[in-house]
Amino acid sequence: MTLAGVVGSAVAVFHGILMQRMMIRPIERALAGTPTSAGIRRLVSPLLHLSTIAWLAGGLALIAVGSGWAPPFRLPVALVVGAFYFHAMVLNCWATRGRHPGWMLMAAALLLILIGA
């Protein structure tokens, strides 16, 4: 489970960096010249980073239960984080038609969760 957490956390951090560079900055530049309210512009980044935050939190939870910090929560953490990672894997594979390494990394983390659970 610890290795699954490391993989998931690393994917989350890398995903956050790429998301900021390749999606959020261009969207913010595009919205700058429109009559969009300031509140909506402030929401773009946090909403797009929601998956990054969930994957990172899940990875840290996997590391915690895999390291023996919270043994009674091993199965619930595996189920919840596994559901997040499964969702990410399926949608990433579908959206990119399998040409993006993210779905493969999430599949590897999911396999490690299954082995560790």
Image: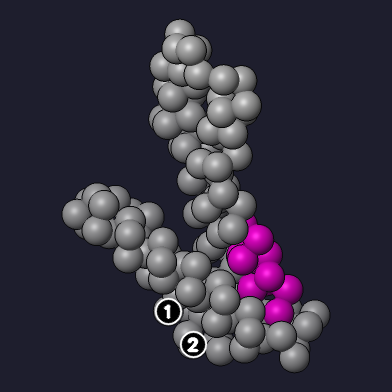
Task: Look at the magenta stretch and give its main secondary structure.
Answer: helix
Foreground pick, 2 / 24: 24
Checking the image for residue 9, the label placed there is none
Task: Residue 104: tell me if it is visible.
Answer: no
Q: Can you tell which mark lies on residue 111? A: 1
* Residue type, label 2: Ile
Residue shown at 48% from the left, 12% from the top:
35
Mark 2 and mark 1: span between their CA atoms? 6 Å
- Dot 1: element: helix
Q: Which residue shows up at 44% across the image and 24% down it?
A: 27
Quadrant assignment for the C terminus: bottom right
On screen, residue 93 versus residue 41, left or right, reads: left
Instruction: Check disc 2 and report its element: helix, strand or loop.
Output: helix
Colouring of the image? one colour
Q: Which residue is mark 2?
A: 115
Q: Is residue 20 visible?
A: yes
Label 1 environment density (alpha carbons within 10 Å; few <14, some 14–19, many ≥20): some
Is residue 109 shown left or right of residue 39? left
Magenta segment, which residues?
Answer: 56-65
Q: Position of residue 33 (x, y in %)?
A: 45, 8
Residue 50, image x, y percentages:
56, 49
The outermost residue toward the right is: 69
Q: Are marks 2 and 1 in contact (CB under 8 Å)?
A: yes
Magenta-colored stretch includes residue 58: yes
